[in-house]
Amino acid sequence: MEGSLRRDQRGQAFTLEGLVSAVVVLTALWFALQAVIITPTTGGSVDPGVRAEIQQQADDALAIAAQTERDTLSELTRNWSQSRQTFYGAVNPRIGYGQRELPGTLGRVLNDTFDARGRTYNVKMRYLSPDPAVETESVIIASRGTPSESAVTASYRVTLYDNMTLTSPSSGPAELWQYDTNPTSNPIPGKSGYYPVPNALDGPVYNVVEIRVIVW
Amino acid sequence: MSARLTVDGERGQLLLVGAVVLATVILGLAIVTNSVLFTENTGSGEVGVESAVVDEFDYEVQRSTQSLLLQLNHDERNVSWSDLNATIRTNVHNYSNLLARSYATAGTVHVDASYAQTIHNGTRIVQRVDRSFTYNESHSPLVVSDRADWTLVQPSDRADIGWLALNVDLRNTSGQQAALVLHNGSESLTYQFNRSKDGQGSNLSVSVDSSWAGELTQTECQSVGGRVLVDIREGHGFFDDCTFTTFDRLTGPYDIEITDGDELTGQYELVVNQTWHDNGNVIESAVGPYPDCSASGIQPPCVSPVVWTGQVDLSYRSTTATYAATRNISVYGGDA
């Protein structure tokens, strides 16, 4: 009799232990499944591998445009229309080329690389002031919208020289150092028209301009 | 009964212990998996981006330094070797400062480029005033003893040519041909120039003949303001699209001869890789005999020093990358 009673008690103990074991295992499983990694993709944005690929493509586009023999990045920076105070063929100074394809090698490569794949981009030119205390200034080459949080930026620097000329069809033979950097209607005597990039240095070097491409 | 009771008790405890162990394993796997995925997402992409920036910096500094040296070589002609070196160092330093500002505005990056030394210098033979392509042995404008047929670069001084450009005064050039002949000891290339239409035209007629294949090119280059600018090395005019055979068709080094130089009027510049020796107060040129351009009262052509191959030190420093290199810059192309 006494032994039977103990077996009943042990059976209740076994049941309890089994229940507790199940609860422990299920709790651990639930916790593991609920653990979430906070990554840039958590909110549904671009995968890091894709961002790296876009970054490489933007870097390559600029490098190709800078190092080609014709229609170079340097020529693009000097493709300026003095009368319209923006780049030649652009829509207006606020958006530059906007949705239009940029001229030259950079425009072709950006179109083939990004436009064809449904991505959009802004392009900007930054240049230095002769006064080191002054921040860099910039001019819009193409503005197509507000970049998303996952946008990538690529840049390339080009050196301009005093003896270079503007490359737009409407420009004359004047060298860069001869241009005024103020967009006034009455140019300073001895200066022949307006080009925003100033002569930042004595000597043959005129300025170092940075072309920035932001892709999203 | 006691033994059976003991076995039953142990089995129940084993179930509980096993469950706890299994739960611990599940939690451990979850932690490890999360860590791996997090690490992959923070990844090494930034390193790849910075290597592209460093490559761009290296390439553009080399290219810009080459352009800078070329312009400084052909700027002033009345300079000594020490003056030219000082000018080069100053300009490369200023360019480096400008570049550093540009990189600094984009992030915590410091770049620097400095001119280290000249590996190999050369000589520029220049006629910078309009006169006939003749040679005056006295080098004095007061003594008229010009020779129409003469040797610009002697066979004993055969050299590689980095620059050869003519700025022809077409109005004072005749319809009779003047010739510039390049020899390499076995073959020759002859450039002949004359004013078109028997001396009445507004173009410069350029024909190129070789000793191995006869006539190679016959073209005319248009004048602008009465002048024609031609680049013999690259084989084209500066103001229009006229093209002709480049002298690369003939393997160097070269000696250069001028015949009937009195038929051609204008200016010219030639750069050869003969070394310019600055021996204290005495300037010796292996290309000659020509007077130093810094001397006064001389009849051109004269000589002045140029850098043929220079060396520049580059450095790039950011919070994640450090890069330093020394690059040889071949100003006129070819192997540095």
Image (tube, rainbow, N blue to C red):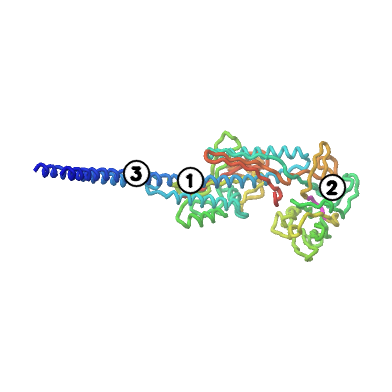
How many C-alpha atoms fall within 10 Å of the one at disc 1: few (<14), some, or many (≥20)? Answer: few
- Name the residue at 59% across, 45% down: B57
Tell me the subunit letter for badge 3. B
Identify the mark nearer the N-term, 3 or 1: 3
Question: How far apart are the two marked residues, 2 and 3, measured between alpha carbons?
Answer: 84 Å
How many C-alpha atoms fall within 10 Å of the one at disc 3: few (<14), some, or many (≥20)? Answer: few
Q: Which residue is mark 3?
A: B28
Q: Nearer the viewer, mark 3 or mark 1?
A: 3
What kind of element bears circle 3? helix
In the rendered image, residue B298, in percent from the top left (x then y), is placed at: 85, 43
Vertical placement of A206 versus B195: above or below?
above
Using the image as rendered, state which of residue A103 and residue B30 is in the foreground.
B30
In the rendered image, residue A98, in percent from the top left (x then y), is placed at: 49, 51
Q: Which residue is mark 2?
A: B288
Q: What is the span of residues highlighted in magenta in the rendered image?
A: B264-268
Question: How far apart are the two marked residues, 2 and 1, measured between alpha carbons?
Answer: 60 Å
- Residue type highlighted by circle 3: Gly
